[in-house]
Amino acid sequence: MGSNCRIECIFFSEFHPTLGPKITYQVPEDFISRELFDTVQVYIITKPELQNKLITLESSFVSTEESKQKLVPIMTILLEELNASGRCTLPIDESNTIHLKVIDQRPDPPVAQEYDVPVFTKDKEDFFNSQWDLTTQQILPYIDGFRHVQKISAEADVELNLVRIAIQNLLYYGVVTLVSILQYSNVYCPTPKVQDLVDDKSLQEACLSFVTKQGHKRASLRDVFQLYCSLSPGTTVRDLIGRHPQQLQHVDERKLIQFGLMKNLIRRLQKYPVRVSHEEHSHPARLYTGCHSYDEICCKTGMSYHELDERLENDPNIIICWK
């Protein structure tokens, strides 16, 4: 592949009984030198895990000399179409059709934890269930931007690790992103990117469409921007609602928070318990190291946020770190 993601060459190789691995055909001709081929020829030799396996002969297309000669024009078409559109469906004969697609190399997505909340990055209706594996199809109806991974697993009746893997795959393709669990006791603060809401017209349009209450008059940018800027350390979502009823008249506060997190306009300030005494009375002590948030602890222990709060507030060996 070149730097512009074009496929530079397609070649057909086989293992000759006397010559060993060799290039039988390549398009364009003489593109791959013998020296370059030496670096990849190891992949031509059948690996031990594939040896002594039963092979079914169907049309013998690549093992018959007469039909094998058709490979050059086929490879030429493949090269042209893959570089033109990134995909190719090419009928070979009555028995065989080649389906190929160029897959973009993307960075590894973040690991989906049980306390993360997946949110669709586009309209859910844009995705066809049939294009996904069975596990993904089973959990898609439960992804609503508010259920966390563990809850999706329980309600969809799918094993937790399978749900995490499926969501990881959706993250890889940019279908979903992850936000934290929304509770009215949560605390958020704006990031420098909140200024983009003033400067970026397309972001404004997307934001107002997303946060406006269904069936209500369209929310105003002034109200939305004021609400984001009113978030601060010490101000919970419940406080925000109590202080700005007028601005929230047409704004769905849950969607407001959700959109802000998705676009990095705001960030969540999370509570991390730290055990300052060596005594083991604080259960579970292994989670009170300052590295585990309330969300994670609640998911792992089954406690509610309120129950955990009460337990830790009454424990003199625990301090709470906000970060």
Image (cartoon, rainbow, N blue to C red):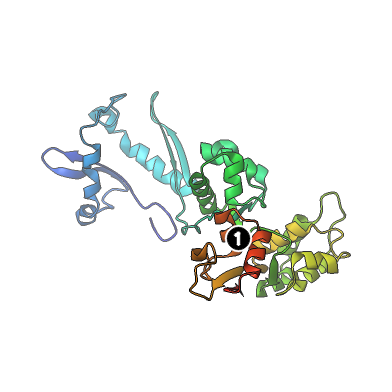
Give the vertical position of 181 relative to 162 (above or below). below
- 58 left or right, relative to 288: left
Give the vertical position of 112 relative to 228 (above or below). above
Residue 245, picture quadrant: bottom right
Quick one: 285 or 173, which is closer to the camera? 285
The residue indicated by pointer 1 is 295
Q: Which image quarter holds the N terminus?
A: bottom left
Query: What residue is drawn where x is 31% and y is 24%?
Result: 59
Task: Look at the numbered disc 1 and give the secondary structure of its residue.
Answer: helix
Query: What residue is drawn where x is 56% and y is 55%?
Result: 301
Horizontal and vertical percent for residue 99? 44, 37
Horizontal and vertical percent for residue 42? 21, 49
- 46 left or right, relative to 184: left
Q: Three-letter amino acid code at disc 1? A: Asp
Quick one: 213 or 294, which is closer to the camera? 294
Q: Seen from this angle, which residue lies furthest left?
A: 18
Horizontal and vertical percent for residue 98? 41, 35
Quick one: 227 or 54, which is closer to the camera? 227
- 64 left or right, relative to 273: left
Query: Can I make out residue 46 in this image?
Result: no
- 97 left or right, relative to 128: left
Quick one: 306 or 195, which is closer to the camera? 306
Residue 296, picture quadrant: bottom right
